[in-house]
Image (cartoon, rainbow, N blue to C red):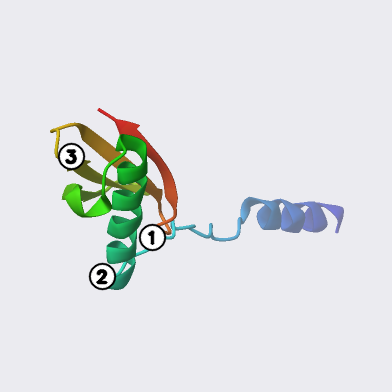
């Protein structure tokens, strides 16, 4: 009887529950949000470079694993990159 109990416990211990696979949540930034991001990027660059936002050109929008980047340049051909998180919140402006 004792052997049957130990054998039963041994078999149940070998069974592992199926692993739940966690998938990364990917936030999708829609057209309205991307326009908000562009406006914010232009405003930040205009303030940083002491020029008008209407003179700032944004030329690229790229998605990375957990963030977004917008590339642009000023009227004086100074380039910059605006970084945003996965939800589209502004992180920082890098002068290039």
Disc marking residue 26: 1
Which is more N-terminal, label 1 or label 3?
Answer: 1
- How far from the left and from the top, in percent, is residue 69? 28, 45
Disc marking residue 31: 2
Work out whether residue 60 can be spotted. Answer: no
Residue at (18% x, 39% y) in the render: 74
Q: Is residue 17 left or right of residue 86?
A: right
- How far from the left and from the top, in percent, is residue 26? 38, 60
- How far from the left and from the top, in percent, is residue 19? 53, 57
Relative depth, front residue between 35 and 28? 35
Relative depth, front residue between 11 and 71? 71
Residue at (53% x, 60% y) in the render: 20
Write down the residue under mark 3. 73
Q: Quadrant of residue 27?
A: bottom left
Disc marking residue 80: none
| Dot 2 crowding, Cα within 10 Å, few <14, some 14–19, many 20+ | few
The answer for how far apart the CA atoms under marks 3 and 1 are is 29 Å
| Dot 3 crowding, Cα within 10 Å, few <14, some 14–19, many 20+ | some
Residue at (30% x, 70% y) in the render: 30
């Amino acid at each position: 009887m004792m052997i049957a109990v130990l054998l039963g416990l041994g078999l149940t211990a070998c069974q592992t529950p199926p692993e739940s696979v966690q998938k990364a949540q990917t936030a999708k930034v829609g057209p309205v949000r991307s326009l908000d991001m562009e406006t914010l990027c232009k405003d930040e660059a205009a303030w940083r470079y002491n020029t008008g936002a209407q003179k700032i050109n944004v030329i690229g929008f790229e998605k990375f694993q957990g963030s977004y980047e917008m590339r642009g340049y000023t009227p004086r051909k100074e380039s910059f990159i605006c970084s945003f998180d996965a939800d589209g919140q502004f992180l920082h402006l890098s002068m290039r």
